[in-house]
Amino acid sequence: NAGVTQTPKFRVLKTGQSMTLLCAQDMNHEYMYWYRQDPGMGLRLIHYSVGEGTTAKGEVPDGYNVSRLKKQNFLLGLESAAPSQTSVYFCASSSSGAATQETQYFGPGTRLLVL
Amino acid sequence: RKEVEQDPGPFNVPEGATVAFNCTYSNSASQSFFWYRQDCRKEPKLLMSVYSSGNEDGRFTAQLNRASQYISLLIRDSKLSDSATYLCVVNLEKSSGDKLTFGTGTRLAVRP
């Protein structure tokens, strides 16, 4: 049982390049989340999904797109990377929503540097 | 005012000390409360949920004060391995449904 995995672990991009971050979970969780973490800012929610085929915007969605074609996978895309998107990206999943006191399980993170 | 506010620390304590962190939240209708722990360059992991009546897990005690809108975490008999950043996490209001709001964290350093 791998839990939540993320690929890649680290990536360097040039401004304007595109990339996709992959998150996979093997816990059959309905809910999945993408966060970014920056120094002094805490984790901020980018997008989330409450089930296969659904996505919703979080606190900081601009410049990102997501897709949840399969229940176990949640993809985060950057169409045209900007230096402001340099950050550590965490994926998380949970069996039910945040209001239910259910734990969110996090992946190990992806460190992205945009030059 | 930040939605979830924590003292960033660092709290620098000797082994065996008792240390307490507080966290305030902005919305009195908040429903779910947690403490997560994050080690350097690692992902956050749930330390404990916080329940209305307060709860304890070994050396860790969490309290919720709805009237004053804060939660607290008490660590007794600190160990070197407790050194980490502790994140206060809140589901702020019913309308935010499935979203959690994270504090920026309080850093704890336990010295020998």
Image: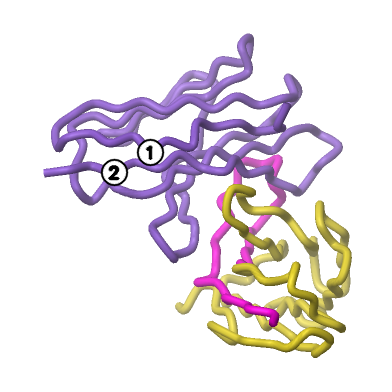
Q: Residue furthest top?
A: B67
Task: Report the chain holding disc 1.
Answer: B
The image quarter in which residue A71 lies = bottom right
Position of the N terminus of chain B by quadrant: top right
Residue tagged 2: B109
Would you identify the image quadrant in which residue A52 lies?
bottom right
Chain identifier matching the purple colour in the rendered picture? B
Whether label 2 touches label 1, CB < 8 Å: yes
Left or right of B49, for residue A47 = right
| In magenta segment, residue A91 | yes
Same chain under badges 2 and 1? The reply is: yes
Q: Mark number for residue B10?
A: 1
Which residue lies at the image location 63% right of the left edge and 9% below the top edge?
Answer: B67
Q: Which residues are magenta?
A: A90-115
According to the colouring, which chain is yellow? Answer: A
Looking at the image, residue A59 sits to the left or right of residue A94; the answer is: right
- Above or below, A54 against A24 in this view is above
Q: Nearer the viewer, residue A81 or B42?
A: A81
The kind of residue tagged 2 is: Ala
